[in-house]
């Protein structure tokens, strides 16, 4: 049996505008979205996830940051 669900999330992150790979906020947004979908590391290109959640439904994703 196959099932599909749709979720909506809010991603809160911080970034370092002085990081060598910083280009613009659009790129930091894309990096934060990628990290929330495929969390392979806690910090990437100066972007660090703080919270991924759907507060309306009280869903919170676990973020493993050092």
Image (cartoon, rainbow, N blue to C red):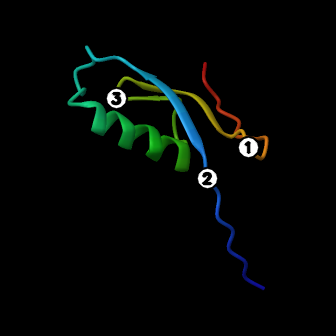
Q: Quadrant of the N terminus?
A: bottom right
Residue 39 is situated, as x and y percent measured from the top left of the image, at 55, 42
Which of the marked residues, 3 or 1, is nearer the chain's N terminus?
Answer: 3
Which of the marked residues, 3 or 2, is nearer the chain's N terminus?
Answer: 2
**Which residue was labeled with disc 2?**
8
Which of the marked residues, 2 or 1, is nearer the chain's N terminus?
Answer: 2
Q: Nearer the viewer, mark 3 or mark 2?
A: 2
What residue is drawn where x is 61% and y is 18%? 66
Horizontal side, residue 42 vs residue 24: left or right: right
Distance between mark 2 and mark 1 Cα atoms: 9 Å
What residue is drawn where x is 65% and y is 32%? 63
**Which residue was labeled with disc 3?**
45
Distance between mark 3 and mark 2 Cα atoms: 25 Å
2 and 1 marks in contact (CB < 8 Å) = yes
Q: Nearer the viewer, mark 2 or mark 1?
A: 1
Horizontal side, residue 13 vs residue 63: left or right: left
Horizontal side, residue 18 vs residue 46: left or right: left
Query: In this rendering, does residue 26 appear at all?
Result: yes
**SS for callout 2:** loop
What mark, if any, has residue 65 been given in the picture? none
Q: Residues within 10 Å of mark 1 (few under 14, many from 20)?
A: few
Q: Residues within 10 Å of mark 3 (few under 14, many from 20)?
A: some
Residue 55 is situated, as x and y percent measured from the top left of the image, at 72, 38
What residue is drawn where x is 60% and y is 46%? 9
**Which residue was labeled with disc 1?**
56
Q: Would you place residue 16 above or below residue 53 in this image?
A: above
**SS for callout 1:** loop
């Amino acid at each position: 049996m196959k099932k599909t669900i749709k979720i909506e999330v809010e991603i809160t992150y911080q970034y370092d505008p002085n990081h060598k790979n910083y280009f613009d906020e659009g790129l930091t947004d894309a990096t934060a979205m990628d990290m929330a979908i495929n969390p392979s590391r806690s910090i990437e290109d100066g972007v660090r996830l703080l919270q991924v959640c759907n507060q309306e439904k009280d869903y919170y994703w676990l973020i493993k940051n050092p």
